[in-house]
């Protein structure tokens, strides 16, 4: 009860519907609208570019959605069920050693880059040093068993391509983690994935939050995919270093899920093996939808520093692995 004559300020949630009851149905409605809208509007989309744009946008969102849900569920489980001190006990106490251990731990998570962001967010909230969580964020989409098997299938009879992808991705992830450990500042990393009381509440909140940024990234990726002419790619395939940079940029723009990017890379027959490797290493670490997810989860100040450094490490590690192994 407030004193007479004073203005009592209502709580933030006053007058608002409970988010737990709205989020699942809203997010499910967006997904259904994408699929149904694509089918209903297809006969009216006569322009080839518009039809391609709609197909790519829906494909990116639908392809990434199961892994996004998987990652959000793991993040919620970490927040709700794992004791706060577990991760600090499981990882080495020295942060410099915890970074490569966390990077190697990414090999056991069968998910894509959409899943790694909420999982890394949950790890940070549970006391894991940010450098180790970020190394896990970068490595898990690129070196998990599902991705490595897909790479072996896409490049039959080329086991060195699988090894090169594993090595380059792990080196880049650990390198970025160590760099963040040395120069990163806590004020650059604002973890906006808030913990709620239960597993379901945490999952509902993070699913809507991450799903919105996934849609933003999908819109941008589909637009750029249609705008960039294919002829520009074939014109630079014969220039070694330029082809590496072009496929790195293409990986960022196309935003293909890491479980499928090996098949796209294998289809780029005009490019060198090192350029194809760069495409597969850069994509799971830096693409448009992932940038949007990182900025939404950890803040813009984090993204503007983390993304360029990660891109540089991924390209350098790919070139080195290609030169040694391919």
Image: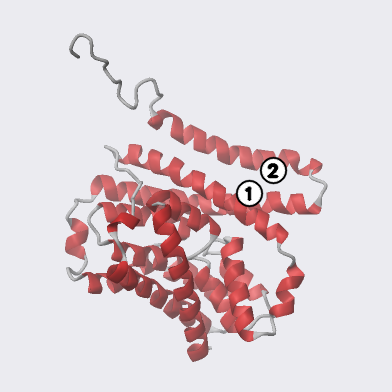
Q: Quadrant of residue 243?
A: bottom right
Q: Secondary structure at mark 2?
A: helix
- Residue drawn where x is 55% and y is 52% of the image: 217
Q: Is residue 116 visible?
A: no
In front of the other: 62 or 154: 62
Q: Position of residue 103 (x, y in %)?
A: 34, 70
Give the position of the N terminus as an image quadrant: top left
Q: Secondary structure at mark 1?
A: helix
Q: Position of residue 247 (x, y in %)?
A: 61, 73
- Residue drawn where x is 69% and y is 80% of the image: 237
In front of the other: 170 or 158: 170
- CB of mark 2 within 8 Å of CB of mark 1? yes
- Residue drawn where x is 63% and y is 74% of the image: 246
Against 19, residue 277 (above or below) is below
Q: Is residue 276 left or right of residue 100?
A: right
**For mark 2, what is the residue?**
38
Going from N to C along the chain, the mark reached first, 2 or 1, is 2
Q: Position of residue 2 (x, y in %)?
A: 19, 14
Q: Is residue 243 visible?
A: yes
- Residue 58 marker: 1
Give the position of the C terminus as an image quadrant: bottom right
Tell me the colour scheme of the image: secondary structure
Q: Is residue 228 left or right of residue 80?
A: right
Q: Is residue 182 left or right of residue 89?
A: right
Query: Mark 2 to mark 1: distance in Å?
Result: 8 Å
Q: Position of residue 141 (x, y in %)?
A: 45, 64
Q: Residues within 10 Å of mark 2 (few under 14, many from 20)?
A: some
């Amino acid at each position: 009860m407030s004193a007479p004559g004073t203005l009592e300020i209502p709580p933030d949630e006053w007058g608002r519907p409970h988010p737990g009851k709205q989020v699942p149905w809203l997010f499910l409605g967006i997904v259904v609208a994408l699929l149904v809208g694509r089918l209903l509007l297809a006969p009216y989309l006569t322009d080839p570019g518009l039809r391609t744009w709609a197909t790519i946008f829906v494909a990116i969102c639908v392809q990434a959605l199961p892994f996004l849900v998987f990652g959000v569920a793991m993040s919620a489980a970490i927040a709700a069920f794992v004791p706060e001190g577990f991760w600090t006990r499981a990882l080495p106490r020295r942060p410099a050693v915890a970074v490569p251990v966390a990077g190697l731990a990414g090999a056991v998570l069968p998910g894509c880059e959409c899943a790694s962001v909420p999982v890394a967010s949950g790890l940070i909230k549970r006391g894991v040093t940010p450098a180790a969580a970020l190394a896990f964020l970068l490595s898990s989409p690129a070196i998990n068993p599902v991705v490595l098997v897909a790479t072996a299938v896409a490049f039959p009879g080329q086991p060195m391509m699988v090894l090169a992808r594993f090595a380059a991705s792990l080196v880049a992830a650990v390198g970025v983690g160590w760099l963040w450990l040395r120069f990163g500042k806590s004020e650059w990393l604002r973890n906006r994935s808030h913990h709620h009381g239960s597993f379901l509440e945490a999952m509902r909140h993070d699913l809507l939050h991450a799903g919105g940024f996934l849609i933003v990234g999908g819109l941008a990726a589909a637009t750029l995919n249609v705008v960039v002419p294919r002829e520009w790619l074939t014109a630079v395939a014969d220039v070694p270093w330029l082809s590496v940079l072009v496929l790195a940029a293409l990986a960022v723009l196309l935003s293909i899920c890491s479980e499928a990017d090996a098949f796209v890379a294998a289809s780029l027959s005009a490019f060198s093996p090192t350029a194809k490797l760069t495409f597969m290493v850069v994509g799971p670490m830096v693409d448009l939808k992932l940038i949007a997810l990182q900025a939404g989860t950890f803040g813009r100040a984090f993204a503007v520093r983390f993304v360029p450094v990660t891109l540089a490490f991924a390209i350098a590690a790919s070139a080195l692995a290609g030169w040694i192994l391919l």
